[in-house]
Image (tube, grey):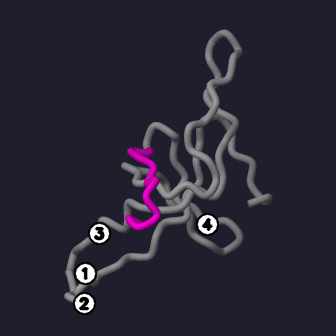
Amino acid sequence: MESVQLLGSRVLVDRAAANDKSAGGIYLPGKDNDQLRGTVVAVGPGRMLDSGAVVPMTVQNGDVVLFDSGTEITVEGKKYVLMFEKDVMLILKDKAAQ
């Protein structure tokens, strides 16, 4: 995403679409686990320490993550979630889990 430049340890996530059906086709009302999942589309350079050194980011573009919180923003007509790297709880490594 070239239209934004994130600062510090900020992360921009494209939230996953809500999936209200189980793998077996059963509707699950109120299921919002997918609302906390998304794909990282942009990251900042990292957190700057008092010494001026920059701690590099752990998450990278394309990572599928579960996150705790964030702020919904709109960029070029599309909704994203903006958060700090510390709000990312985990990176999903197994492609089958996605």
Q: CA distance from mark 3 to mark 2?
A: 16 Å
Residue name at image x 30 percent, y 65 percent = 33
Residue 62 falls inside the magenta stretch: no
| Figure quadrant of the N terminus | bottom right
Label 1: few (<14), some (14–19) or many (≥20) C-alpha neighbours in 10 Å: few
Q: Are marks 1 and 2 in contact (CB under 8 Å)?
A: yes
Circle nearer the N terminus (3, 2): 2
Residue kind at label 1, given as amino acid type: Ser
Q: Residues within 10 Å of mark 4 (few under 14, many from 20)?
A: few
Residue that badge 1 annotates: 22
Regarding mark 2 in the picture, which secondary structure is present there? loop
Q: Which residues are magenta?
A: 88-98
Q: Is residue 92 left or right of residue 28?
A: right
In the picture, which quadrant includes the C terminus? bottom left
Please state which amino acid type lies under the numbered disc 2. Gly
Image marks 3 and 2: residues in contact by CB distance under 8 Å: no
Q: Quadrant of residue 31?
A: bottom left
Q: Are marks 1 and 4 in contact (CB under 8 Å)?
A: no
Q: Is residue 42 above or below residue 78?
A: above
Q: Which residue is mark 3?
A: 32
Which amino acid type corresponds to the residue marked 3 in the rendered image?
A: Asp
Q: Residue furthest top?
A: 51
Which label belongs to residue 74? 4
How many angstroms separate mark 1 from mark 4 (CA)?
Answer: 29 Å
Disc 1 or disc 4, which is closer to the eye? 1
How far is mark 3 from mark 1, CA to CA? 12 Å
Label 4 secondary element: strand
Q: Position of residue 21 (x, y in %)?
A: 27, 84
Disc 1 to disc 2, how far (Cα)?
Answer: 5 Å
Q: Are marks 3 and 1 in contact (CB under 8 Å)?
A: no
